Amino acid sequence: MNTLQDTMFQEIRNKEIFNLAQHYSLEYLNTIFDRNVFPTEKALENLSVFDEELPINSTNAKNVIDQLNTFGTPATTATIGGRYFGFVTGSAIPVGLAAKNLGTYWDQAPAMNVLSPIGSKLESVVEKWLVDLFNLPKKTSAGFVSGTSTANLCGLAAARYRILERNNWDINEKGLRNSPQIRIVTSKQAHSTVLKAIGILGLGKENIEWIDVDNQGRIIPESIPELDANTILVLQAGNVNSGSFDNFEIICEKAEKTNTWVHIDGAFGLWAETVNELKHLTKGIEKASSWAVDGHKTLNTPYDCGIILCKDQEAMTSALHMSGSYILKSSERDGMFYTPEMSRRARIIELWSIIKYLGKKGIDEMILAMNQRAKQFANEIEKINGFHVENEVVFNQVLVRCNSDEITEAVLHNIQMLRECWLGGSMWFGKKVMRISICSWATTESDILKAVKSFEKALELSKI
Ligand SMILES: *Cc1c(COP(=O)(O)O)cnc(C)c1O
């Protein structure tokens, strides 16, 4: 009798399910730029086929793949395409998808060098590349995590470790009970994941000293409270609504004088540093202590790819690993010292591939094009009576509103129903806005024109 194990050997040998999955994948990619950006009502209804009781018996592998393709594929959002403007998603560069595919079959976990020499090698190489790309201090270390949510958590954990250590308090041994006070200072526009990290780390959201912002969502430097060495100051490169940047040059200098730990949440905006025409936005970031950034947003690596960069390697590795710094004296990189997880997938494979593929010039070109498409969109939409651009388009974000909140809401709903592009809504200083994020390599000038047409149609529909 054929056991399940026999069947699995057979599946590797005859390659059928792999060829099938590959066939569906390539078909998907070939239609991604033309399909509806959001699933149809029918596709969403069909998702109910997944509502099954726990299967008791084995299912044929081909049927598993077929079910995913038949009902899963139509229910995806076309974030890889050129007209998905929701949240700040990023697309996926072809070579990154191909490399991820190869890496999937390697199935490596770069927790330790011995567990994955290739994963470990690529992590050490890319760490240096990132330090070069972002012009950070030479001794900066990188940890490769799932996204900026985790990267923010790691940066703030390193800050917490260092500040308490300076107060002769080992957070790992003693915990937070009766520990010296850490002050936490951040912008009224800080991203929700920064607040989440503050909560998880036991610093307490109620203890945050909030800083006022200007009409673009940037910290007003004069509003920053007196800083000291027991303070963590969290800044932002790329406001999730307006795309604006805090004034790092002035603020970091202030913080440096008082030995304050500065963490920069640069999920999508830190990449401005890699673009000649945009790096004025990130001037002064090298004076911070830690930086969180995503690969899967602006750089367009596939999901999931976040990076924590930290100038204080000992603080980072001590915060994320209990056994202290002496283990690091091994000459090889053991990735688990730089991340909360022990096992994790080798997402470095895609990150390495994409940086290798684009090079510094390619990164510059791709990100500048996003900026230009965002400006194009803002220019085109302002020409239409009834739309107003609410922000200075400094990077890749455009905030648009109509003549009233009611109309803005109706128009946004219509745009989403038309499915020619997709974007979400937000609030900006008390007003409803539509938030357009241009962050795909694939967005062309004609995608922008198509999207503007869709906005126009949606406005007309709202008048009926
Ligand atoms: C997206 C984003 C985050 C969270 O990043 P994830 O990769 O989704 O975890 C944090 N901060 C800002 C400014 C963001 O745009």
Image: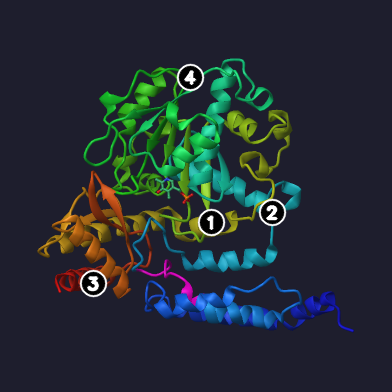
| Residue 274 sits above or below residue 234 on the image | below
**Sequence-first tag of 4 and 1:** 4
- CA separation in Å, label 3 and label 4: 51 Å
Indicate if the residue with disc 1 has its beta carbon within 8 Å of ligand 1: yes
**Sequence-first tag of 2 and 3:** 2
Residue position marked by numbered label 4 in the rendering = 230
- CA separation in Å, label 1 and label 2: 14 Å
Could you say where residue 150 lies in the image, as x and y percent from the top left? 53, 44
**How many residues crowd mark 4 within 10 Å: few (<14), some (14–19), many (20+)?**
many
Label 4 close to label 1 by CB (< 8 Å): no
| Majority SS type along the magenta span | loop
Type of amino acid under label 2: Ala
Could you say where residue 146 lies in the image, as x and y percent from the top left? 55, 51
Indicate if the residue with disc 2 has its beta carbon within 8 Å of ligand 1: no
Type of amino acid under label 1: Asp
**Sequence-first tag of 1 and 3:** 1
Q: Secondary structure at mark 3?
A: helix
Left or right: residue 115 compared with residue 213: right
- CA separation in Å, label 4 and label 2: 36 Å
Q: How many marks?
A: 4
- CA separation in Å, label 4 and label 1: 33 Å
**Sequence-first tag of 1 and 2:** 2
Residue position marked by numbered label 1 in the rendering = 304
Residue 25 visible here: no
**How many residues crowd mark 2 within 10 Å: few (<14), some (14–19), many (20+)?**
many
Residue position marked by numbered label 2 in the rendering = 109
Residue position marked by numbered label 3 in the rendering = 454
Q: Secondary structure at mark 1?
A: loop
Residue 112 visible here: yes
Start-end of magenta stretch = 72-82
Left or right: residue 231 compared with residue 349: left
